[in-house]
Image (cartoon, coloured by chain):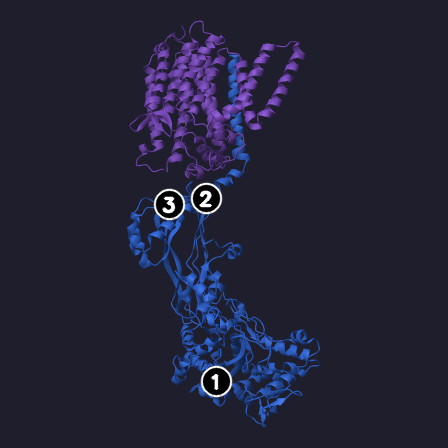
Amino acid sequence: MRNSRKAGIFDYDWISVLLFNLLVFIGIISIYSATYNQPHTNIFQSFYGKQILWFAFSYVLIIFIGFVSLKSIKNNASMLYLGGILLLILVLIAGANINGNKSWFRFGRFSIQPAEFVKLLTVLGLAKLMTEPDFKISNLKNLLQATVLIFVPVFLILLQPDLGSAIIFLSLFLVFYRDGLSISYYLLGLLVAILFITTIYFGQQKVLIVSGIVFLLLNLLFYLKVKKIFWLPAFFVLTLSLLSILGTEFVFHKVLKPHQRNRIEIVLGKKKDDKGTGYNLKQALIAIGSGGLYGKGLLKGSQTKGNYIPEQHTDWILTVIGEQWGFLGTLTVVLLYTFLIIRLIFLAERQKQKFSRIVGYGLVAILFAHYALNMLMVIGLFPTIGIPLPFLSYGGSSLWAFTLLLFIFLKFDAHRIEDW
Amino acid sequence: MNQKSVVIIFLIFLTSFIIAGRLFYLQILDKEYKNLALRNAVKKEYVIPERGYIYDRNNKLLVSNLPIYDIMAVPNQMKAFDTLEFLKYTGISKETLDKALQRAKMYSRNKASLIVPKLYKNEIALLQEKIYKFPGFFIQRRAIRKYHTKSAANVLGFIREVNENELKKDPFYLPGDLIGKAGVEKSYEKILRGKKGVKYYLTDKFNRKIGSYKNGKFDTLSAVGKDLQLSIDIKLQEFGDSLMKNKRGAIIAIEPETGEILALVTAPGYPPEFLSGRNSSKNFNKLFRDKINNPLLDRGLQGEYPPGSPFKMLNGLIGLQENVIQPWTAYICNHGFNYGKHSHMFCHCGANGRKVHLPWAIEKSCNTFFSKTYLKIINNFPTPAEGLDVWHDYLSRFGLGQYLHTDLPVGSKGLIPDSKFYDRYYGPGRWTATYTISNGIGQGEVLTTPIQLANVAVAIANKGFYYTPHIIRRINGSQKEIDSFYLKPKYTEIDARYFDQIIDGMAAVYQRGTARYSQLPDIELCGKTGTSENKTRIKGKIVKMPDHSIFMAFGPKKHPKIAVTVFVENGGYGATVAAPIATLMIEKYLRGKITRTDLLNRVLNTDLRPIYQQKAPEKNEKQ
């Protein structure tokens, strides 16, 4: 065999490790500039000091992963998943109530957000399920199983309630696509989303009429081309569309809370509320927009220094980068994420084992969802939801969960040649 | 690579492209956000400089600044505090405090509001030491004017908060700024106010300062207001005040050599501190509503009266210059003369059929001489209109019938009629010189203000020229910034030689004439009494009141150092009140002491209030 030796530390993908360190470093600098002027007695009382601590501890976790055998992870994946579910139930019972959300376990001065770790555990559980013998995602029964596996944590997290984290789990459906699920499911999902948005924007009546005409035209075109009518799919699409359009009103007004409605309307430009719900977004746009090409320089951002944006060290950290380093700064961060994600896809694709490939795609999906939704939210293209920017935003739970997921996958990758 | 992974990679690229594109739009293309960020975070703060001091001509301090303290509070920074203790330190009532706090909360929770205004240093001392006990409260220092004299309120003026109009007119001012509203505070506002400094601060979302903007690169320093040295002699001014006690009227004293106003007394007046400090608004309303005494009216600058006999000097001068009379010209006076079928000009000069020449006519104030001279001036021209306009132009060059343009913000034009005036009244060409004969003796249509008359005295003392009367002497110790208008002589276009006879006549007034009882030992003075008739309406009936007493003087005769005009409402003959006052003013200025104590006592004991009381409408009689 060409590679009979055991994989060592140098077999970890150094590009991914470098990108990881770079992102955390940028994060610490940004957290420092966002919070350095807030009162603190010593460096480890401050946000940036703590983030440095969390970063140091994430290396403890990386070393720990180095000692854990991949086999035991794979074999115990179902137990780990169930443990995660248990954590989510426990947090609903014993969690600390912070701003009406029961998302945190509190241990003295420290808090831990189990949902962050459950992302990792769900990925492992999913990988376990999908590597069962005879599992085929295109099989409806198997698809249902996998969907339930994702929706159990989603349901529990919605009870906290934490809409942002819940939405992130939906990104795991991307894994199914890579594993052979037909694209038509995704197109149907896209259709529902488009109908939902257009109905809110234009109103039920207009959307009904226009989509009806489009539906008939498409069918006609299709018929003219293949001279055949597919009654069942057509009927299915029609029903789904009608349900989406008619259900939008209900979901929008009865299911969503007023502030969520506001956020959607603000993004759609139907509402202006720069002092209320829209305050954060407005101030974020001012911070980013005033950065220009080069930015105002480190610690020179008036928006950042003035604490105009609440949570600028966590979910809104991009505003700090945008104001201080301008377009060059934000573009750098966008490119770093893009490179990292694509690099991880590349790594996932070179896996010999299905299990590790699914873990890789799970990581890609979650990372991508966090990166994309957070940035789209900060630049006003997606309604405000509370999700952090991976590796950059302040917060131990988020950093550790991503570190664990990344390095478990990197360890799988390092050992891809071996038969574990 | 797997085909599906390519689709996923494409999806990721697409998303990143959208994000980068939007960022490009926000950060590079859209310029609006830069301004919004500045507007958000950069706040200007003005540094108000100290207002300039005001001194008198002998460098005696008249106006300085007094620190005064406001207790301010920011509601959101307040914590529970001992209310009783706070009330004890500040001396305000609980209701006042509660009301002020409520108002503050309604205004803004994050911005400072005024809680207790205008406390003096001794009143704030206790609280200042204990302010740490009251979080959210702080003490803000500002300045009000402190006056070192009880006189000259009309000259010094006062400052107040700017009003809407002033805010609109001059971008220098911000709401709450102080501005000169009267006197030199108004006319020299731009010099006294100094230059505001600007400091730029970065503020956080609660509007709290978090540091300077760009290390103060755009900040500008404030410049302290410049000091004024006024031309008034405060001792003379205060002395004038004491002389005018219980009288109404004005005293104007001017240095002929320079046109500098030495004293500008108006009576009744008020102490300048009346309009400064805690009760200024209340006091202002009180003064403003007092229409009986009208203390806000500067009678010296604004009062318009028939000048009476002092005006005769001018007709004499014009007659000489126009060559219609000669130094030896004399007229026979027979208790006056007839100038028309049924028209008679009365005269009290006592010549009784004898010939009267110019100096004597002045000494005895002969109506005949001057009205005949006046008629000759007018009739020297083909039409009375031409003659009158020539006469009018001469008087204009003395500063009469128009604003004098002193450097004080108020004044009146007075009235010197020209041909248009009578054309309007009688119709063009339908009047003759005799219609206007009263102008010859300073009655009729002629009106002057006391300062105009004082300026005439200056022009006579200088033999033909004057400097426009002004109150400014130095700005920050130099003349450089003084308007050159006040430093240029204005010529009357009457030859200096014609003044000699006039001056001799005025000297004779003191030696033998109407003011002989007021003459000073060792100093030769020149003067002219005036008496102006007036009537008033009491209970619907027109009643003749005692005459206004007028006196115009300068001295010493050889090298005049001071010219004075005194005007006392209802003071009787010019010789009774006005002449002694003018003489005392001159002596006070020239000698620094009073030798004619008899005159002084007489003036001090003259109380005209009973006469004014008659004029007052009944409802105000209790005042």
The amino acid beneath tag 3 is: Pro
Q: On the same chain: label 1 and label 2? A: yes
Task: State how far apart marks 2 and 3 are (Cα).
Answer: 23 Å
Which percent across, then down, holds residue B142?
A: 39, 56
Q: Is label 1 in a helix, a strand or a loop?
A: loop
Q: Nearer the viewer, residue A196 or A166?
A: A196
Q: Chain for mark 3?
A: B
Q: Is label 3 in a helix, a strand or a loop?
A: helix
Q: Vertical placement of A244 versus B608: above or below?
A: above
Q: Which chain is blue?
A: B
Q: Earlier in the sequence, mark 3 or mark 1?
A: 3
- Quadrant of the image occupied by residue B196: bottom left
Q: Vertical placement of A286 versus B111: above or below?
A: above
Q: Vertical placement of A304 versus A350: above or below?
A: below
- The residue to which callout 1 is attached is B575
The amino acid beneath tag 2 is: Val
User: In the image, B168: left or right of B596?
Assistant: right
- Quadrant of the image occupied by residue B395: bottom right
Q: Earlier in the sequence, mark 1 or mark 2?
A: 2
Q: Which chain is purple?
A: A
The amino acid beneath tag 1 is: Ala
Q: Nearer the viewer, residue A370 or A298?
A: A370
Q: Is label 2 in a helix, a strand or a loop?
A: strand
Crowding near pointer 2: few (<14 within 10 Å), some, many (20+)?
many
Which percent across, then down, holds residue B535?
A: 54, 78
Task: State how far apart marks 1 and 2 are (Cα).
Answer: 70 Å
Q: Is residue A240 visible?
A: yes
- The residue to which callout 2 is attached is B42
Q: Any mark on residue B75, and which?
A: 3
Crowding near pointer 3: few (<14 within 10 Å), some, many (20+)?
many
Q: Is residue B477 visible?
A: no
